[in-house]
Amino acid sequence: MIWFVFAVVTAAALIAVLHPLLRSGEAAPAAPDDRDFYRQQLAEIERDRGRGLLTEEDAETARVEAARRLLAATPATVANGVTRVSGAGRVAAALVVLAVPLFSVALYLRLGQPERPDMPLTARLSDDPAKLDINAAVSKVEAHLRKNPDDGRGYEALAPVYMKLGRPDDAAKAWLEANRILGETPDRWSAIAEAQIYAGNGVVTAEARQSIDKALAGDGENPRALYFSGVAAEQDGDKAKAVAVYEKILGSSPKDAPWLSVVRRRIAALTGQEPKAQPQAGAPSSPAAEALAALPKDQQQAAIRGMVANLATRLSENGQDVEGWLRLVRAWTVLGEGDKAKAALGDARKALAADSPALERLGALARELGLEG
Amino acid sequence: MIVETGHFALVLALAVALVQSLVPLWGAAQGDVALQRVAAPAALMQFALVTVAFLALIWAYLTSDFSVQNVVENSHSAKPLIYKISAVWGNHEGSMLLWVFILALFGAAAAVVGQDMPLRQRANTLAAQGWISTAFLLFILLTSNPFARLDPAPLEGRDLNPILQDPGLAIHPPLLYIGYVGFSIAFSFAAGALLSGRIDAAWARWTRPWLLVAWIFLTLGIAMGSYWAYYELGWGGFWFWDPVENASLMPWLSGTALLHSIIVMEKRDALKVWTLFLAIVSFSLSLLGTFLVRSGVLTSVHAFATDPARGVFILGILIVFIGGSLALYAWRAPMLKQGGLFAPISREGALVLNNLFLSAATATVFVGTLYPLALEATTGEKISVGAPFFNLTFGPLFLALLMIVPFGQSLAWKRGDLAAVAQRLVAAGVVALVAGALVWAYASGGSAVAALGAALSVFVIVGSFIELASRAWRSGGGLGLALRRAAGLPLSAWGTAMAHAGLGVTLLGLSATWWGAEKILTAKAGETLEIAGYQIKVDALTPRSGSNYTEMVAPMQVFRDGVKIATIEPSKRNYTTRKMPTTEAGIATIGLGQVYVALADESTPGEIGMRLYWKPLVLLIWIGSLVMSLGGALSLADRRLRIGVARRAAPRAAVPAE
């Protein structure tokens, strides 16, 4: 279809451009020449004199000058009459007919993408939802919310999707909007806290603490809010308080609650009763990791990737961090992204080229993970 | 499909431009009429194809087609309609497409209007226009393709530079481009004349209307850009001798010279070779302007993108066109038939003087703009050439030029009588002196420059109309007859008077800056500030947020003698997505003057730095440009042919002594 359009356009262009060559044998219109110009000028001098714009005397001077130029002007060199297309004309026409389409198509094929349709935004967004990819669906909901900013349910639905996509900042904002429109609930506050912690790479920020407090103010036994207040206490170094909080969760949760094992593991880690529960060597061991573990399985993966990506960005801005690079290379390997791990290793060696102990450690890690050889 | 059709149309336009560049030339060389006739339809077809491409890109913007990279980089689905359209040329690729679109428009118009030109000359001229199109279409397709696609297509665009989100963007570039590109026609006519080896008064007659169109639009474009900078950039100034501004001023100066020399050529068949040279220079300076702006040599709001490949390409175009046309000029110009000689004291003599001054002025701007760049390129040393340099070099040249404007206008063709002219201009001189004295008194011991400037501008304004008046009064008669005669005077005479008066009006506005007032201070909410007799009460100092920015606003009321005249809201904005601060000046227009407030940063909480200005008569600067353009339009509307009318030098001499 598109090639048909191109063909029509090209043909139209050729016909338009070459029609002087196709009209062979017709009477050519009279070619104007310079003398016409001076004849018009003379006529105009007369007109001006008649209207009183030129005095008799001025008009005479002007007339003399124009007449002199008229005599000097060359007559048209082209004889008026019937045009015949010369041999040169035929050659030129043939060349143009061949060269224009060939040139255009060849250049267009190098530059253009004939098979790609237009993609107007409205059409893309009104596509069958089943065919929409997740990003398009998000955009559609976002557009809807721009027009209906008071649709609290829309925000409520969008927030967890943001979490899945690794956009915790947006998730927190969406839940805040839902809170504003539908009224605050402890559950949403605890979700906001989770998003904020995720956004802070596992650190319970001051913002997150406020969210936790609001959740607990509404429901003192909200398990998610309690859990994160425990993590906050741990990060403050207040182990006793953390353990107390975790105990409280155990006490108030149903016996089959899915988060019990995580909470028990935290208590064990803090009280040192079950060292076996320590995470494996190499994996990051911190409250953040535990916070991650509290997430549902499908969110965990996205969250981990988000954190690793954050780390990569940070290192690309400031590469003088051996520990960071080691973590990054290891993390990509654990995630099964061998290529990215190798790329990160390369970047690290470039960034730390002047630091030979660091290079040794990188080499050791590469051997350990089997990234080289 | 629309996008790809636009893309293909652009490629095809290049092919057609190549045909337009080569076939008519060959025809002219072979003396083949049919081949020479190909030029006009090729120019029309090229225009049609570029139009299709341009509309296709606009379509992509309107539908937020984010599969087109250019749309992603410069648009956003939530942007208002007008900015979606103006964003088409608010970026490098799109603005080059606009450039070529206007170029093709001019070519097509020349093909249609030029039907009464001799065939050979028309073929050569349109072929020259074809070369320019070819060069720029190649540039677009190879280095700055607006139809490049992205895969996968993102769902949202990156929005437009906030400074450019302004109605100014919808108008400023098209105006300026019509001006720049309009000179291409003068260039093509010159190249055509050199190729044909013939140049005469008829040539001037065909070229002049195009030149006028270009000049009118360039004048408007420069004025518009300056006003935009004045209210949007918040520096309190309107002209900064920035290289980008100079880039537009240089073609304007040489174009103005060309406009005057071509009149001499049309009326007196003289100054031919010089006129051709000016035509080449004017377009070369337009190209230079494009190079400076587009190559990334300069970093400014105009340098949308910096890419060495583009810079090298445009530099190549520049070398080929300027070098090529000057070589052609050196080769063919000596073969042209020279025009007549003329007396120094005459209208044409005055126009030569005008050309000398304008050329010198162009040269000073050229040196002031390029010398720092050349120095930085060769030695790495950075110097800044700014207002002091231009005030010392360009200023006196231009003031001297303005002094002679009323004289030149009143001199007769061929043989002028300077004494008689001086006599007639006495009236203007007297009015001017009075005006100067008044300003001196009003500004009470203020700058002498202000008084001189005001006197000179009044001299130019009054002097511009003296010629009309003297022609209307010529042979006595009552006021009624004089008015009727004035109305009957050719439009071009009115056009000349208007354009020159506009110059005076602008100069008056510029002189008034010397008796304005400026204060730099910090203020708190509730404070009342004082400038040049106006009281400005700062009502509050509050943060506020808009759709895509946050700002610090200081609403103020302007009082004069206790009476409230206006409210203004200067603010300091921060565009969050692009992390760009902008200053929104608060401007209250009072008569022709303005109170102008620009905020600085908040120094200590609750206290903000600001600059206060009282700018008397400032609007005259731009009103003058409008008057100048109007003069150009009047002259353009005059379809008459011209011939220089010599006035007998001294009718008295003919009267025998008694």
Image (spheres, coloured by chain):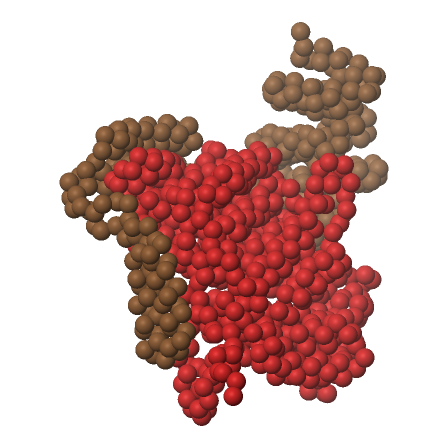
Please determine whether, in this image, residue A200 is positioned above or below residue B577.
above
Quadrant where the N terminus of chain A sits is top left
Quadrant where the C terminus of chain A sits is top right
Please determine whether, in this image, residue A353 is positioned above or below residue B82.
above
Residue B359 found in image quarter: bottom right
Which residue is found at the position 26% from the left and 45% from the top? A78
Q: Nearer the viewer, residue B610 or A187?
A: B610
Q: Nearer the viewer, residue A127 or A113?
A: A113
Q: Nearer the viewer, residue B418 or B615?
A: B418
Q: Which chain is red?
A: B
Q: Is residue B449 visible?
A: yes
Which residue is found at the position 34% from the left and 64% from the top? A41
Please determine whether, in this image, residue B590 is positioned above or below residue B155.
below
Q: Is residue A358 left or right of residue A25?
A: right
What colour do you see for chain A? brown
Question: Residue A367: x, y in percent?
Answer: 72, 10
Which residue is found at the position 83% from the left and 17% from the top? A357
Question: Residue A257: x, y in percent?
Answer: 62, 35
Question: Residue A355: x, y in percent?
Answer: 82, 20
Residue B589 found in image quarter: bottom right
Question: Residue A161: x, y in percent?
Answer: 54, 41
